[in-house]
Amino acid sequence: MKKTMVTLFMVSFCFMLTVTLLAAVTADSVIGTWLVPKGDAKVAIYKCGEKFCGKVSWLKTPEDLDTKNPDPAKRKNKILGMDMLWGFHFEKGEWVGGQIYDPDSGDTYKCKMYLKSDDKLNVRGYVGVPLFGRSEIWTRVK
């Protein structure tokens, strides 16, 4: 009987903790400036209409051009200020349905994001389904 009560208490506690943590994340929680893992760029995520978007707001080498872009007409554009994320909506604690552009490769991927904590954003770019992709942890700039 005592073991059953302890187990029931622990399950209830874990459930309440999960509900509390999920309630703390709102659609606008992702808004802000994020440092990429290499430390060479910052991306500002903002609301664009009903969706969420992001653009390169700081670059260690601000004169870098988008030389790997598959569109030859865009290869002379600066990476600083470019749109890098677009089309995200908030659903069940994640930002989904968006795309991410990787200026290092010139490729665009489907993307989803979720907060690991207030200051850590998991960004997953993928082809087809999220299983076939790569994640990075971005850090919020304060």
Image (spheres, grey):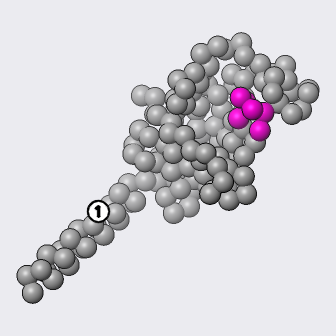
Question: Which residue corresponds to mark 1?
Answer: 17
Find the residue positioned furthest to the front: 132
In the depicted view, which residue is nearer to us: 61 or 46? 61
Of residues 64 and 20, the one nearer the viewer is 64
| Quarter where residue 16 is shown | bottom left
Question: How many tags in the picture?
Answer: 1
In the rendered image, residue 33, in percent from the top left (x then y), is placed at: 52, 32
Q: Between residues 81 and 128, which one lies in front from this camera angle? A: 128
Q: Is residue 130 magenta?
A: no
Foreground residue among 129 and 20: 129
Quarter location, residue 14: bottom left
Which residue appears at 59% of the width and 39% of the height? 46
Can residue 98 be seen here?
A: no
Name above or below for residue 3 compared with residue 84.
below
Quarter of the image where the C terminus is located: top left
Above or below 35: residue 7? below
- Callout 1: few (<14), some (14-19), or many (20+) C-alpha neighbours within 10 Å? few
Magenta: predominant secondary structure element?
loop
**Image point (86%, 33%), residue name:** 70
Amino acid at circle 1: Leu
x then y, percent, for residue 100? 69, 42
Q: Is residue 6 visible?
A: yes
Image quarter (top left, top right, bottom left or bottom right) of the N terminus: bottom left
Give residue 122's position: percent from left, percent from top: 51, 45
Magenta-drawn segment: 102-107
Describe the element under mark 1 as helix, strand or loop.
helix
On the rendered structure, is 25 left or right of 95?
Answer: left
Q: Is residue 62 left or right of residue 7?
A: right
